[in-house]
Image: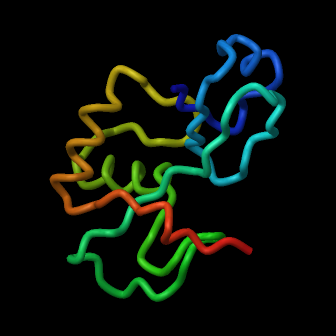
Amino acid sequence: TWVIGKWAGYRDQMWAPAGTVFHQFTVAQIIEFRKDCTYRDSIALLLPPSAKGVNGCEYTLRRRAVYACHAGGVVHALQGYPDHEVGAIDVHRIDTLWNAALHHGFMPLPHSHYNYL
C-alpha cells in the first residue's frame, strides 16, 4: 500500500512492486500508469458534527465531506501547528495527524458515500 499525491508521476509509480494499491492523497486524480497496480480514489473524511455553516460539497464528494488534504489543513490549524498540508507531507507524522483528526471528530468517509459524476 502506497499513499501518493498528485506529483507522483511515471518514475515514482514504477518504484512500486506489482500489485501495489495506491491511495491518493490529492484532489486532482493522478495519472494511472500501472496496469498491474490498483488505484483508489482520493481519501476523504466527514467533517465533525461541531462544524457549522457547511452547505457546499467538494468535487465528487457528498455534503459535509472533505478531501483528506483539506481536512489535514484544518487539523493543523486546530492543533496550532505552524505548517500545513500543502505540498509534500511528513510521512512520520501521519499517525499523529490521523489521531488528531479523530480527536477533533473527523471520520473516514465510507466508499459508498462518494458521488461519482
Residue displayed at 41% across by 62% down? 109
Please tell me which residue is depicted at 49% across the width and 71% down the height of the picture.
Answer: 113
Q: Residue 98, image x and y in percent?
A: 29, 42
Residue 64 found in image quarter: bottom left
Q: Where is residue 53 shown, x and y percent of the image? A: 36, 87
- Horizontally, is 54 left or right of 2 in the view? left
Give the mark count.
Answer: 0
Q: Quadrant of residue 5?
A: top right
Q: Where is residue 30, by image quadrant?
A: top right
Q: Residue at x 55, y 69 (%)?
A: 114
Examine the rendered structure and indicate whether residue 10 appears above or below residue 63.
Answer: above
Farthest residue to the left: give it. Answer: 103
Residue 24 is situated, as x and y percent measured from the top left of the image, at 60, 41
Q: Is residue 67 above or below residue 10?
A: below
Position of the C terminus, as image quadrant, is bottom right
- Residue name at image x 24 percent, y 46 percent: 80
Position of 18 compared to 109: left or right?
right
Residue 58 position in % (x across, y down)? 58, 72
Residue 115 in the figure: left or right of residue 68: right
Image color mode: rainbow
